[in-house]
Image: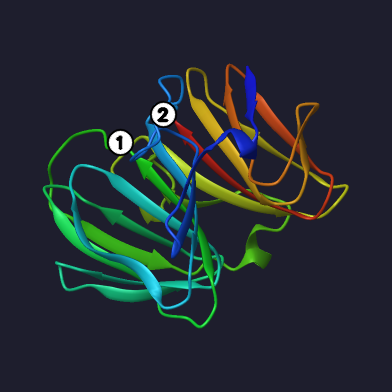
Amino acid sequence: MIDIRKFDTLGHANHGWLDARHHFSFAGYHDPDRMGWGALRVWNDDAIAAQAGFPPHPHRDMEIITYVRTGAISHRDSMGNSGRTAAGDVQVMSAGTGVTHSEFNLEDEETTLFQIWIIPDRDGGNPGWGQREFPQADRSGRFVTLASGIAGDDDALPIRADARVAAATVTAGSRVAYDLGAGRHAYLVAAKGRIRINGQDADPRDGIAIRDVATIEVEALDDAELVLVDSL
């Protein structure tokens, strides 16, 4: 099945400094039919105003992946980590037994990002954080794994879940494919560009929930930037 969830049907909260779209139930947005997809629990499409951000707050027992689309986000946490993650790059925080962190846009321009939460395979464990640069040229015409807890995905940021976060850039008129294992769930979003998925058209930032499909075939109708989560 392929279920295309149009951008204008997503949950929406505008706090002034933060304009957020929620693919799944989150905070004040609740839809019993959109509580998650496999182990994927949260996919927020956030626009954060310049010199604004999330003050220190706690998490536990969640894998939190931040994919920066434009601008940059600056991270600090109770483990003593700090770092700046720029457009196209990724940071991962394993909340484990508990961590407090802040995420601020210290730039002079708006930052846009996807914040993705994946339920870990087991609760507990020491919290952790990491970030990496993933040049877009390296994922031209193919999916590259950004974060993963799947055996064999060694060249990726580690997460504590049987799940994978992958991304690709595809030029207009070109195609890219992703093989989805039996019993697994995929959730795909085009950060930019119109796409066609196994014959069905989707617009930028639509959510596409996929299962029981052996091969996901994506044709770029415009130059497109794709982000995908594969989980049980």
Q: Secondary structure at mark 1?
A: loop
Q: Residue at x 63, y 38 (%)?
A: 8
Amino acid type assigned to the residue bearing label 1 in the image: Ile
Horizontally, residue 61 falls left or right of residue 208, namely left
What residue is shown with label 1?
Answer: 119
**Is residue 28 or residue 103 the one in the foreground?**
28
- Position of the C terminus, as image quadrant, is top left
What residue is shown with label 2?
Answer: 36
Horizontally, residue 50 falls left or right of residue 7, namely left
Q: Residue at x 39, y 72 (%)?
A: 52
User: Sequence order check: which comes first, mark 2 or mark 1?
Assistant: 2
Between the residue at mark 2 and the residue at mark 1, the CA separation in whole angstroms equals 10 Å
Judging from the image, the colouring scheme is: rainbow
Residue 115, position in %: x, y? 43, 51
Horizontally, residue 99 falls left or right of residue 76, namely left
Residue 18, position in %: x, y? 44, 60
